[in-house]
Image: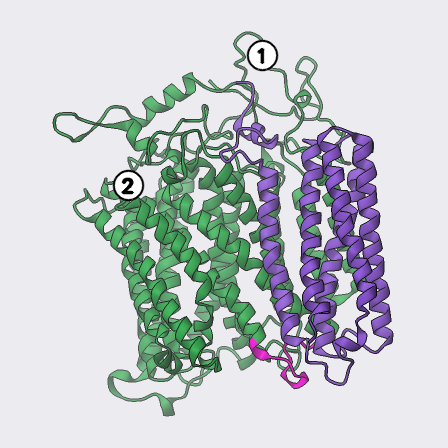
Amino acid sequence: MAIIEQPAPVGAPALPAAPTPTRTYGALRRPVATTGWKSWVFTVDHKKLGIMYGVVAMFFFIVGGIEALLIRLQLAAPNGKVLSADVYNQMFTMHATTMVFLFVMPMAAAFANYFIPLQIGARDVAFPRINAFGFWTLVGGGIIVNLSWFLGGAADGGWFMYAPNSGPVFSPSHGVDFWALGLQITGIASLTGAINLIVTVLNMRAPGMSLMKMPVFTWLQLVVQFLLLFAIPVITVALFLLSFQRNFGATFFDVSAGADPLLWQHLFWIFGHPEVYVLILPSFGIISEVLPVFSKKPLFGYPFVVFSGAAIGFVGWGVWAHHMFASGLGPVSVAVFSIATMAIAIPTGVKIVNWTMTLWGGKLRFTAAMHFAVGLIVLFTIGGLSGVTHSVAPSDTQQTDTYYIVAHFHYVLFGGAIFGLFAGFYYWWPKMFGKQLNERLGKANFWFMVIGMNLTFGPMHMIGLQGQPRRMYVWTEARAGEGFFNIAFWNMVASIGAFILAFGVLLFLINVFKTTRSKEVAPLDPWDARTLEWMTTSPPKEHNFDAIPTVHHLDEFFHRKYEQDPNTHEMKQVATAEDILREQEANADKHIHMPSPSYWPIVLAGGLPVIALGIIYSIPVAIVGAAIVVLALFGWSLEPSTAPDSDFDPPASGDGTKELAPLG
Amino acid sequence: MADTAVHHAEHGHHTSTGLSNNKLGMWLFLGSECLLFGGLISTYMIYRGRVGEGPRPGNVFDIPFTSVSSFVLLMSSLTMVLAVAAAQKRDDRGTTLWLTVTGLLGATFVGGQMYEFTAMYNEGLGYTTSLFGSAFYTLTGFHGVHVTVGIIMLFSLVAIIKRSNVPGDKAEVVELVGLYWHFVDIVWIIIFTLVYLIPA
């Protein structure tokens, strides 16, 4: 039995001479609660933070989903009356902003936080407090972005906020200010998260885990974090310039003052295009874990999947201007970016081939997770192909600002990114909560989502090519067209599809609710999985592994369970997950000191929204926020991230096996 | 086996790359900062000719003055190196001395920048006078804020070393601040060259 030692709680029932937490650093005693809300709010545990990321992201998924349904209600029939033009503009802006920055990114971060340390055999991330800070910063940013709904109207310039729509003339409410400052804050969360996870992956791998023995999910998340590391500062500059223009009278994007409106577009898309790979690569990683497990085969061409992921990470920087073909860049630029865009389809195609070949000849088990993974391959390929049609600049000029574009990016983002995340839910739920999501409901969830999504976004290809512009709050019967291409019919289909899709998501929520209530415990290794995160209890203990495993193979866990029969060359099971865990417990590390909880991350993160509100309404408030930030920074720097040894209960005498903290 | 991987890594031992987590993290952060200044410098380069009714760059820059303050900032890199060297020799007195000198040199630079901004404002270049003005003040202002943050870190570090409660490895903490400081200096070399020396 392993021991995990924790700083003793203040005023704990008198163990002989229980130590009290020191306060030699900063003003506050350390938080020590191991249960109740305090154990969550002040936690630095990557697993708890991962779950909290997931809960917040799910909340914003529902918010963004409701916004989407309102948009579809408005467009279901000609001359829609559900939303006014102004509210409609806010609705599509906030739908995109919410889904991109507050759902897909945080949900991918939830999986990254939870599973990267487990997959590389580490006990936590490199900077646990920065991890907690990142989470609370995201919450603050999400609140600021959405607060504008209640304070005079949300941002209404589209998620890419082109000038002049972003300026005070066309967007006089504070919506854009809230949007710019809120995204600035979530950007801080992404940047700190990126640094943290890169250091974790590069520095904290278990002995023997070389880079080419890392699970693919971890690999692709590493690529994502590098993309964020270099993309976030560019949007930071753009958002600063926008804020300075709106709040301090600069004219960076004001054409009447001689500014170049393309500056914003370049800055935004230099961030924005790497960003789309930030959204999709985590899901690629998830299904690269799911497909081999449910095919009972190793991933076909592991190095190709890894290197094509890295290639996407590089080429992704050279294609941003394909978002700007209609802006008159000149023939040379357009040709270069057009060819680069076609080229980036190659590494993506490599992946699709690899996934398909993984399935080929495998012993397929069509679980709910597998449904979503296969769904991703099909739907993403459709979206990828329409994407290649955009890379042809003359064709793109026709498609720009029509529903064809909307169709394309929903196929890659919903059919790609979101289906991958759902595959992750079904695959990893038993690991995270020790309970298995209901498979039958899961498959129903899948079918409603896949049918709903094709009904919603499929017709948009047609209505787009028929010329219906995106971001228009009404369409009129007079221009509906006739016969098969009647956009009235297809708009209605899309709206009905959206509700079928929403029902599918509702089934997922029902599934979560039912599973949480059920008492049925999931088996230790329900899927016969392959990677290290399954080589521990479900849910994992606070310190993840009783003994840090030494890695000899890609798919280490699988190779501990199976060995090749020398005569038949068949893989034969030699151990169960239970055997492996028992062995690990027997050789458990002693005196595991985990990083200590801290007040400072949430205090520091709490100062940022105060600054944002201050910039919008009153500078003295911003100064108060800045003071909070400065104080928190000092408190943070003076506090070691792991409490000193004197803060821990001394290990029991003898062989030192004293249980001091609740496990799991 | 008295400790954990987490614990070890905190102190910079036994990481997969051999680099300590803190140092690797700082390098990554500085890599990210390159793109921040890249964006700001690009913005300035696009807008430096757009002076509207306001003064032109050549009319407001005082190159000899800025050369001197640039020289002061560059010398602070030298004193920072001396501080790091002293910290590695566990020489607390030397460390605090050189950190203080570095901070004072940095403060001189920021003071010079404030003087320069005031002079330019008096010559008619306000923040909103022209695109050139906005872009210039934004770029150099961001750099100035970076230097100021560095100065605060230097003096805080001096205070903490004097009270001898640095969490973690003292020499490494000094080195981390040093990395940041050198980065800010290098950025200034680029800004000084592009903004002041190359005529618009």
Residue linked to disc 1? A652
Mark 2 vs mark 1: which is more N-terminal?
Answer: 2
The chain holding disc 2 is A
| Badge 1 element | loop
Residue A337 x %, y %: 42, 71
Which of the chains is purple?
B
Extreme residue toward the top, this view: A654
Q: Position of residue A549 (x, y in %)?
A: 41, 26
Amino acid carrying mark 1 in the image: Ala
Q: Which residues are magenta?
A: A250-262
* Looking at the image, residue A319 lies above or below residue A143: below
Q: Quadrant of residue A462?
A: bottom left
Same subunit under labels 2 and 1?
yes
At label 2, counting other C-alpha atoms closer than 10 Å, the crowd grade (few under 14, some 14-19, many 20 or more) is many
Q: Nearer the viewer, residue A299 or A575?
A: A299
Q: Which residue is mark 2?
A: A293
Q: Which chain is green?
A: A
Q: Residue furthest left?
A: A568
Secondary structure of the residue carrying tag 2 is helix
Residue A334 visible in the snapshot: yes
